[in-house]
Image (cartoon, coloured by chain):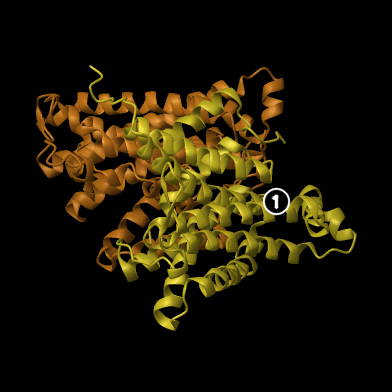
Amino acid sequence: MFDWIHLSIPPAPALFAQLLVGLINGAFYALLSLGLAVIFGLLNIINFAHGAQYMLGAFCAWFLLNALGLGYWPALVLAPLIVGVVGIAIERLLLRHIYRLDPLYGLLLTFGLALIIEGIFRQQYGSSGQPYAIPPELRGARNLGFMFLPNYRAWVILTSLAMCLATWFTIERTRLGAYLRAATENPVLVQAFGINVPRMITLTYGAGVALAALAGVMAAPIYQVSPLMGSNIIIVVFAVVVIGGMGSISGAIVSGFTLGLVEGLTKVFYPEASNTVIFVIMALVLLVKPAGFFGQVR
Amino acid sequence: MAQSGRSAWIITVVLLPCALAAPFVLYPVFLMEALCFALFACAFNLLIGYVGLLSFGHAAFFGCAAYITAHTVKVWGLPPEFGILAGVGVAALLGAVFGWLGIRRQGIYFAMITLALAQMVYFVALQVPFTGGEDGIQAVPRGRLLGVFGLDNTLTMYYFVLAVFLIGFGVIVRTINSPFGQVIKAIRENEPRATSLGYHADHYKLVVFILSAGLSGLAGSLKSLVFQLASLTDVEWTMSGWVVLMTLVGGLGTVFGPVVGAFFLVAMQHYLAQLGSWVTVVQGIIFVFCVLLFRRGIVGLIASYAEPRREVPAGEKPPELAGAAARET
């Protein structure tokens, strides 16, 4: 009756390989949900365009390479900056007008933006992916004894961890972060103290978008650069956000990496469920802890 | 409130002859598609417009009912009326599960949860064998309604779709204008107060959610018979966005808004069909435009011109989302 369930103990190398894939996915989930959490904290908007901006980052790197001949390393800096500026323009021109409305309108507006961005790129490039080569410095793999670790994947995991920690440090431990947290709590009061809250909101949105673009650049050599890469990942990231709760930065990081690993493990033991496991976990978490693991009810 | 119910009936009676004559003037398949989506949008609007819950996962009910109807009619050989009932039943059951999980959170979280759950349904539909994967279920026979009316005749099919639409629409109008409808509007306006008056807010939300899911399923089942096809497009998240857009364009929380929005957008899609992915871009632009400048929608705007001096009566809200709806618990 259950012949469609293939439970078996996999060989160790396959296990570690899938764990690595899970860790890589987790790195992207963490970076993206981190950006979502930062934006949500200050703007009270769920940025549906986050996936599209992640895709923009990857395409930006691809353009820099194919049009200007700028390789991976310049793109790693330039693409987030460029996409971040696009984000700032979006905030100034569009999002600014809806802060006084119900937050659901923010979701709808950014959903529309995502459709526009993805539609344009789909029209231009179809649904197929464009290849992006791994930079020569990071090719190859090293033998860890129990498995081969491709250098580029190690780089992605370490860099995204570093970015997550840097963001966490900026928000939780610096003066700028203190302003940010204060403005999240009570923007009017912070403004009264002479801090330019609207500019802070603009820059926060820009920074959140830049984080998504950075994830996109790092993803370019692993997944192909495709117009659909954003919408595929953003819904999973939403589920990650519901599981972790929007309350804390560290929550976003921890739940991102953990769920990536869980997904990787599912691929080993029960591959049919690997696409759905995060959603199932979300449903279970909603039953037990509706506010999410790290969320505060407010 | 009774007044809005009465005016809805008057407009329906005026429009009915037009609807009966329409297939002789316009392309019937277009009309049937528009009616299916109008029913879908009305069902969706029941939730967002009257309970204030934005579901971003209604494609799950629509698509799942389309698959069930297509499968039961094609493989099991059920007559169309039972195929539709099966689709509606499964959609309502799915709605019960989604609603039970989703109403634990509100506002943006509710939207994200429904979106994620619907994505799960999408992946299931992609993997289970009976849905036919990328091909979908094709060449679904329309069969004979009650063993008498052959639905392969386009006109018969059209009047069947119209009748089902009117039944669904009537259920929605009746619900809104019933004492039950008053309670759900009270919950939308001020949930703590409704709770303090002794209403179990979550029970009411769940019932409306199931009703909305079931009616969305009805639309999906109907659509699978009209096009004789159930495919992955029906369960994809873009379909959820599509129904949000139809309701937004027509007017959130208005009785006729979703119908107008559905006809408008289905017509637009027919005219722009050759533009390929630009249709998505146009959809996105309409989304942005509606949110920034046109939040009342077509019908909401007409209503505000038709009755410019009318004070908003207690318990009735202009067709725009109030902040209360999205406050997180």
Q: Label 1: few (<14), some or many (≥20) within 10 Å? A: some
In-image side of A188 versus A245 (left or right): right
Q: Nearer the viewer, residue B200 or B230?
A: B230
Q: Position of residue A107 (x, y in %)?
A: 55, 51
Q: Which residue is labeled 1 in the image?
A: A168
Report the residue at 61% width, 34% height from top.
Answer: B188
Q: Please identify the quadrant where the N terminus of chain B is shown.
A: top right
Label the yellow chain with its letter.
A
Instruction: Please give left or right for residue B55 compared with residue A101 in the image.
Output: left
Compared with B136, B190 (above or below) is above
- Quadrant of the frame with the C terminus of chain B: top right
Query: Is residue B207 at all visible to an observer of this figure?
Result: yes
Is residue B52 among what the camera can see? no
Q: Which of A208 and B28 lies nearest the eye of the viewer? A: A208
- Identity of the residue furthest to the front in this view: A145
Chain ID, mark 1: A
Residue closer to the observer: A50 or A4 = A4
Q: Where is B318 relative to A180, above or below? A: above
Residue A192 image point, x, y percent: 89, 59
Colour orange belongs to chain: B
The image quarter containing residue A193 is bottom right
**Element assignment for label 1:** helix
Q: Position of residue A198 (x, y in %)?
A: 75, 64
Residue B180: quarter of image: top right
Furthest residue to the bottom?
A68
Check disc 1 and give the amino acid type: Trp
| Residue B112 drawn at (x, y percent) | 52, 41
